[in-house]
Image: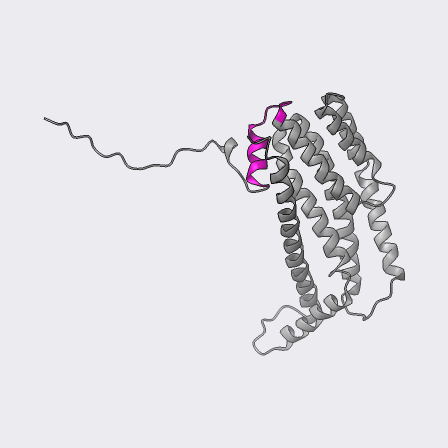
Amino acid sequence: MARLVPNRPFSLKIVDPTAELLGVAPVVMERTAKLASVGDRSHRALIHVCTTLARYGVRACCPPGTLDPAFAALDTAESWTRDKADALAVRKARSDAFNAVIAAERRATDALRASLTVLPRKKKTQIDSHADATVVRYAGLAANFAYGAALLTCDAVDDPAKAALVPQQIAGALAYQAAGLGPARSSESRAGACEQAEWESEREGAPEGHSAGALAVMLFHEFLGAYWRQHSDAQRAYFDEFIVWALADAAN
């Protein structure tokens, strides 16, 4: 007589948290970064990808005269992939680059602050002082994030998983620069926030507690936040094509 075996309920296989993909980079890059062993072919390919992206971001977001420490760190990381530098040399170059971050950020903010005093402004608004401070802040963050990508690239020599963080770091740097030099500095954008704030504060049924000036600042940052996200996502999509192409062989 046949023996009846009770049906087992379907269940999902438990995924090790260390194998979970977070969506911070293309799947091929995250997977390669998690599976690579220190010094293997895949790991070296990741470092080449990261140095390429980081150089692009540093050159775009950091002022002349501040590039050398970041570039030296990236050159050393790349030399490691060819066995022309050891991990200790990469750590030393990384330390030198870290010590140069504040100077790079300060030079970027000083340059933007100076430019705001001489560039003509089409229209004055009540949020100009705050908006100018935001432009300067974004310039500093762009330089900081770009240098951070160089530091992460060096960290990835010891820990391959850190490589997956580089694309979003560069995308963030470029988004801060674009938002700061674009809509944050635009007289039209500032005026648009002020006009919307006037309408919101005066419309029937508007909640109490926010003056037109406070609303203008809030709307200004809402505009910038949306722009930052769109630009960051566009940059990551642009990088994704390069990453998938560059890691095609390493992933096989």
Q: Residue 227 appears at what percent x and percent y? A: 66, 58
Q: Can residue 19 be seen in this view?
A: yes
Quick check: can you spot residue 99? no
Q: Give the magenta-colored segment's residue range.
A: 25-41
The number of numbered badges drawn on the structure is: 0
Q: Is residue 227 left or right of residue 16?
A: right
Task: Specify whether residue 35 is painted magenta.
Answer: yes
Percent x, y of residue 75: 78, 30
Q: Is the residue 244 above or below the residue 132 in the image? A: above
139 shown above or below 204: above
Residue, x 62% and y 37% (percent of image)? 164
Query: What residue is shown at x 65% (from left), y 48% (from top)?
Result: 238
- Residue 78 pos. (x, y %): 74, 29
Residue 203 place in picture, x, y as percent? 61, 77
For the point 39% across and 33% down, the residue is: 13
Q: Which image quarter is the C terminus in?
A: top right
Above or below, comparing residue 238 to residue 147 in the picture: below
The quadrant in which the N terminus is found is top left
Q: Please indicate whether residue 59 sits to the left or right of residue 246 in the image.
A: right
From the viewer's side, name the closer residue of 59 and 244. 244
Q: Please check the rendered image and state whether residue 207 is part of the magenta-colored stretch, yes or no.
A: no
The one of 117 and 212 positioned closer to us in this rendering: 117
| Between 107 and 133, the one nearer to me in the picture | 107
Farthest-out residue, bottom: 204
Picture quadrant of residue 148: top right
Residue 17 horizontal side relative to residue 125, left or right: left
- Foreground residue among 189 and 211: 189
Q: Which residue reaches farthest left?
A: 1
- Name the image quarter holding residue 151: top right
